[in-house]
Amino acid sequence: MTKEIRTVEYVVLPTTRAKGRKMFQIAGACRYVWNHFRENNLADYQAFRKGKGQRPQTSFFSLGVEFTKLRHETEWMQELPANPVKHTLKYFADALKETMAGKKGFPKPRSRKRTAPSFTIPSSAGVRIRKVNEKYSSLLIPLVGWVTLTRRGDNLWENGTPKQAVLRHDGHRWRAFVFYEVEVEKKLDDGEVLGIDMNVRQVATSDGHFYFLPDLKKKEARRKRYQRRMARQIKGSNRRKDTKKKLAKVSRKIANVRKNWIHQTTKEIAGKCGTIAVEDLKVKNMTTSAKGTVENPGKNVRQKSGLNRVMLETAFGEIRRNLEYKCGRLIEVNPAYTSHTCSECGHAEKENRKTQARFLCVSCGYASNADTNAATNIRRLGVAQLHGEERSGSRQTPLSREIDARLHNG
Ligand SMILES: [Zn+2]
């Protein structure tokens, strides 16, 4: 048995006006604190970049001292719970660390309009959840009170220890993401490895199975129609507001279909086998530029450009993350050449891939579905890597880092 973190998503049922208002106030305070610290650190950061001045402080602790001062001076903030607001600094400190490490740019401001209102109840505040009955639970929000939670389907982890909760308003209602620490039985490693090839609308596994994303064409067409309609309508008009609501609704539906599909698919795949091999997304995203792939320059331009590509990357990341915690072990392999190499004889040539769907080896004549062939290659690379890893010992992720990684991605 090992301890791991599992996230459960709930819908927060409408509550009294006073409670609702307070929740928005807490989220507003978090935004205020973020922007305050951003502004405070921006000048230091710019000076440091030019070689003048000191390196900005990036630790949660040093920022915390500054926060206590700010809270003391700001009257309205004293009526709000300290811990959730202070936790914003944890996110800010993490973002600043990434900036200093050269991984990302300076943290962006949080806007009232564009950033979803959210706040976190950290473990330091103590996350309290009560089960009311089969359908409902309640969650204690500091200085707000108990709110009622519900969700479709069971919560498999209700016996776990709630460590942290994130509340986020999606423009329609509040949702609560509760992070439970749970005891899970390590899946028995049966020595079987399954290779996974991820695609825009399907996932192929090395045992020849396909998982197809439900058809979203109608919903996506409707979303496009609303987007165009909204662009034509006058800002601030009631008609535009109406369209905006409809647009948000259909976008939510699309997101939900995708989310459920990912959940179901990864659950089925994880049920098959203890070790999964996937393509390393960092490498894949780097090599899959808008101009095409390293293997295939100039292709996939339309398909992979702009928003579509961002969406794709998050979908792949989501599948990977789900597989990671549902399976016993996840191996990442270098994605280069997996689509052009023959899984039978190892002959690698662009000509092998006749069309998007068909694979026919020009050397040995092996014919297969192109994605199944790729999945088989990914599996082979995974097995090879596994044997290398066993010699050097495997690595473990600490719990707190696991929570943070999920928060940043979710
Ligand atoms: Zn071949």
Image: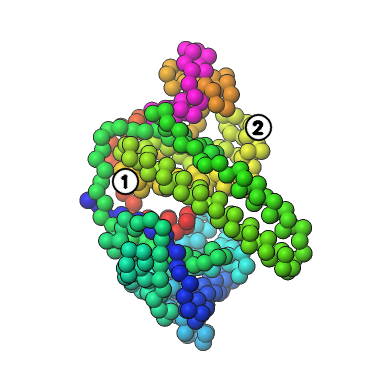
Task: Please check the rendered image and state whether residue 367 is part of the magenta-colored stretch, yes or no.
Answer: yes
Camera sees residue 41: no
Q: Which residue is mark 2?
A: 298
Helix, strand or loop at label 1? It is loop
- Residue closer to the observer: 352 or 355: 355
- Residue closer to the observer: 316 or 97: 316
Q: Which residue is mark 1?
A: 395
Mark 1 surroundings: few (<14), some (14-19) or many (≥20) residues within 10 A: few
Q: Residue at x 50, y 76 (%)?
A: 20
> Is ligand 1 less than 8 Å from the beta carbon at label 2?
no
Residue 328 coordinates in the image, percent (x, y): 31, 43
* Magenta highlight range: 360-381
- The vertical placement of 127 against 370, above or below, is below
Would you identify the image quadrant in which residue 114 lies?
bottom right
* Colour mapping: rainbow
Helix, strand or loop at label 2? It is loop
Q: Residue at x 57, y 71 (%)?
A: 35
Residue 238 coordinates in the image, percent (x, y): 72, 68
Q: Amino acid at mark 1?
A: Arg
